Image (tube, coloured by chain):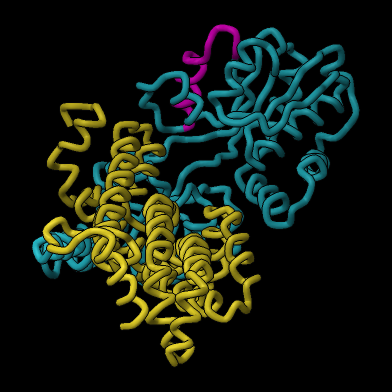
Amino acid sequence: MTDSSTWGWLTSIDNWKNSYSQTGISTQIGNHVEYSLIAVVIAAAIALPLGLLIGHTGRLRWLVGVANGLRALPTIGLLILFYVLLAPHFHGRGNAVFLIPTEIVLILLAVPPILANTFAGVQNVDPAARDAASGMGMTGTQVLFRVELPNALPLIFSGVRSATLQVIATATVAAYVGLGGLGRFVYDGLASHDFPQVTGGAILVAVLALLADIVLSLLQRYAVSRGVSGRFSSRAGTGGPAAAEITQLEVVTH
Amino acid sequence: MKLKLITAVVGIAALVAPLTACGSTSNGGGGGGGGTESVASKLILGGPPEFKTRVDGVPGLAKTYDVTFASFKSLDAGGPLTINALKNGQIDAGDIFTTDPSIKANNFVVLADPKNLYTAQNVLPLINKAKATSGVTTVLNAISAKLTTDDLIAMNEQVITEKKDPKAVAAAWLTTAGLDAKGSQAAGATLTVGSANFQENVVLAEIYAQGLQDQGANISTKLNIGSRETYIPGLEDGSIDLIPEYSGVLLQYFDKAATAETSDDVFAALQKAVPAKLTVLTQSQAQDKDAIVVTAATAAKYHLTSIADLANKN
């Protein structure tokens, strides 16, 4: 309480602990991650299979356009709308009536980038690789999972990463309907004219988004085949373009 | 390679770890000695975010009434979130304005405030001194003499719930109050009537405007101006001359250190606090102020009629 700057707010131990009047920063980071993770996981569960299917079959392409159009809907407006629609169906204690509308709007934000990138990733697979796989006698499903998916991974990852960034930034709206998360500090700070709290909360959201992106980029490094990413360990004996060709081949034949 | 993989896994684990940790601690506060718990310690309070720190919010309830709720939920200022949450039981008590039509519509019970935690908020005209001629003052005083809190509730119901035109609602009130007779008490006066950007204030401004017009004044209106920070400078520079105000918040606006609580004390302090160019006319008994509101079921279960009852041991 002594230092009234943003740095002072961020570094005060009391602000990180839970008390009667305030849920601490550590708990709110946990809540924020929880809301974001739920949204991204559900969005991925919807958009990944759908994107693969649309990319593989070439049907239902309009769905990608429709999903992209959904991004234009105003998040806060949708949030209140869903809350007012759902409220009469929930009685008694519990956060479900606040959590469900929040997750719906976050999922609506996360689906389009994942869907569009998955679709584009599969679409852009070299037709020669696809033909070769079929020519070797692979079934449609085998082509999808052994050729198209591995080759589409870099684009899929970039879709998931941009969805994650957007969800973490937007999960601040959870606080608008009385939930926790880092948005709590932004809304409470604004309401009580406590601006260090507002900026402190906003900085934490940005840091969290960056950390999540770093984690996903690490994951991407290990998930994407070297043949696709073109990254090679300097310790590998042979190295160079020759290895690239071998790995590329492996992608196709495995 | 393996080392990097481990770093990646640890990184993800670090991100997910708080998730599992937070699950158990989401309900802060509450608890206390067995057998001697107060009614409030079993209930959840909801209100606007600033209520958590406001002098008359959570800290005020504890200080004035020794009432400490199990937890506080940040929602909105008497809006759809708070009202729906109270109606459906996500919260047990809410901070709602006394003139909100949803109180009557949902049979909510407004808890009495015997210790005046919530400062009096009587409706009164704030006017440019130069424009407050005796004729104008007579007309506005006659309006204030008739206006009641029940009138505000009824008019809010018509404009908010039934979406009626504030102009028509104001005209109907003037007729019922017997103030619609044409006259010349305010003849020769020229005023611009303003209002804040919420329905109740718009209706009140319409009542002032039409009441003065009926008595021969030359009136123009600038409604839905915005918040106090916007329209008070407007009053001071003469771009508007008259606006309906609420005594308690207005006093707080002019004098941050004000401590008056009752209607009379607030009005007396306000008369001294207004800037030299402005003045407040006689206040009405109509009030629009914060109140702690519970559902009829909760009130019956714990025998609640006043905020003080929340501190009872149960």
Magenta region, residue range: B263-278
Q: Which residue is painted at 88% across and 19% down in the image?
A: B184
Q: For residue B292, say whether it is visible.
A: no
Q: Is residue A25 left or right of residue B6?
A: right
The quadrant of the rendering that contains the N terminus of chain B is bottom left
Q: Is residue B229 above or below residue A122?
A: above
Residue B313: quarter of image: bottom left
User: Residue B253 at what x, y percent from top left?
Assistant: 47, 23
Q: Name the residue rendered at 44%, 73% in the picture.
A: A48
User: Which secondary structure is most common in the magenta stretch?
Assistant: helix
Colour chain B appears in: cyan
Q: Position of residue A252 (x, y in %)?
A: 37, 78
Magenta residue check for B196: no
Q: Where's residue B62, x and y in %?
A: 25, 46
Disc count in the image?
A: 0
Q: Is residue B204 left or right of residue B117?
A: right
A83 or B67, nearer to the observer: A83
Give the residue displayed 14% in from the left and 42% down from the top.
A14
Residue at (35%, 70%) from the top-left corner? A94
Indicate the chain coloured yellow by its letter: A
